[in-house]
């Protein structure tokens, strides 16, 4: 199968030329590797935690021994103490220590081989060019002319939020930003609400550029929109949460750079029959 060609559009939505898409877009779809690579990245950010070594042990409690007709659990000392005789220290007592508390020496990191991680990134890049995967991820695609969507390098120079919104509207991407905005109004279920994660952050359009000449400032206030330099691409931004098929817009120079960043090699197997 020969490499397919794709149009390059100007900011007004008009095709200006055609280019060949990089070979990385022919990488086989590997959702299993994508999921593993994303979990590996997320696990590296987990902060170790544990309980105080003396938690539940700051007590004078000591067992009375046998002959009293009561359980041989440690009991608080002191005849006049309001808690005298109450069980303490042991896990089954109120205020006692925990049986198996979390320990800071626990290793959370999920390791992955370098070649597997690289293949996962290539597969995630290829998934952004498959319309059915992008739709399955929940993105709004009404009016998007082509996959992958490539714009001229003028995209990198957009400096205002107003200009950026106009570009999104021209290519039918604005509805997806509205979807992300609506999604962010929902409150997270569970205890995460008490831990600084009250709302989930929906992901919308990903803008990939070779150089950031102002586009990040123009896009930073729109919910779910991310701007990344091609050299910093990783599987997490391409497939947030391990779900491949993110709605992605490429600048012309960024997509041409992929052949340099991800050359065809042994770790990337492309088979067509």
Image: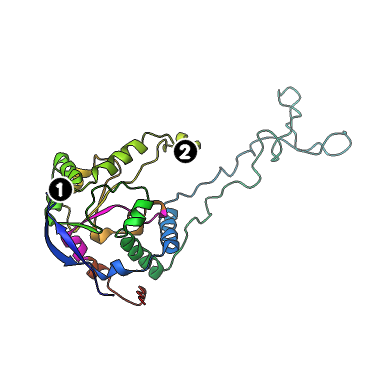
| Residue 222 is one of the magenta-drawn residues | no
Query: In terms of image quadrants, where is residue 237?
Result: bottom left
Q: Tell me if 147 is positioned left or right of 32 in this view.
A: left
For residue 229, say whether it is visible: yes
Task: Answer left or right for 188 relative to 68.
Answer: left
Image side of residue 63 versus residue 162, left or right: right
Q: x and y percent of residue 21 in the render?
A: 22, 67
Assign a secondary structure to mark 2. helix
Is residue 245 in view from this perspective?
no
Q: In this view, does 230 lie above or below 199?
A: below
**Spot occupied by residue 272 in the image (x, y as percentages of width and height):** 35, 75
Determine whether 234 is above or below 175 in the image.
below
Judging depth in this view, the residue of 116 and 207 nearest the camera is 207
**Mark nearer the N terminus (1 vs 2):** 2
Colour style of the rendered protein structure: rainbow
- Residue 174 vertical position relative to residue 121 in the rendered view, above or below: above
> Residue 89: which quarter of the image?
top right
Horizontal relation, residue 120 to residue 165: left or right: right
Q: Name the residue under label 2.
A: 192
Q: Residues within 10 Å of mark 2 (few under 14, many from 20)?
A: few
Q: Where is residue 72 in the image (x, y as percent from the top left)?
A: 81, 39
Segment tinted magenta in the rendering: 242-257
Residue at horizontal 13%, vertical 47%? 158
- Residue corresponding to mark 1: 214
């Amino acid at each position: 199968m020969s490499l397919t060609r794709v149009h390059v559009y100007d900011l007004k939505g008009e095709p200006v030329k055609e280019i060949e898409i990089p070979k990385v877009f022919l990488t086989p779809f590997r959702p299993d590797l994508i999921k593993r690579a994303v979990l590996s990245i997320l696990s590296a950010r987990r902060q170790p935690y544990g309980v105080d070594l003396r938690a539940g042990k700051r007590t004078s409690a000591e067992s009375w021994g046998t002959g009293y007709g009561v359980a041989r659990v440690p009991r608080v000392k002191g005849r006049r103490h309001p808690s005298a005789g109450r069980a303490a220290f042991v896990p089954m007592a109120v205020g006692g220590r925990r049986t198996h508390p979390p320990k800071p020496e626990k290793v959370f990191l999920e390791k992955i081989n370098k070649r597997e991680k690289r293949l996962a990134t290539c597969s995630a890049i290829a998934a952004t060019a498959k319309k059915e995967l992008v739709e399955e991820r929940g993105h709004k695609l009404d009016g998007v002319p082509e996959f992958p969507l490539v714009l001229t390098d003028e995209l990198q120079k957009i400096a205002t939020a107003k200009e950026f919104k106009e570009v999104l509207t021209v290519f039918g991407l604005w509805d997806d930003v509205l979807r992300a905005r609506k999604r962010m109004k929902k409150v997270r279920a569970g205890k995460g609400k008490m831990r600084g994660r009250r709302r989930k952050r929906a992901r919308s359009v990903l803008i990939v550029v070779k150089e950031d000449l102002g586009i990040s400032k123009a896009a930073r206030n729109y919910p779910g929109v991310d701007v990344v330099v091609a050299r910093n691409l990783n599987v997490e931004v391409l497939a947030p949460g391990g779900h491949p098929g993110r709605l992605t817009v490429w600048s012309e120079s960024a997509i041409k750079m992929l052949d340099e960043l991800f050359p065809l090699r042994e770790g990337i197997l492309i088979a067509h029959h």
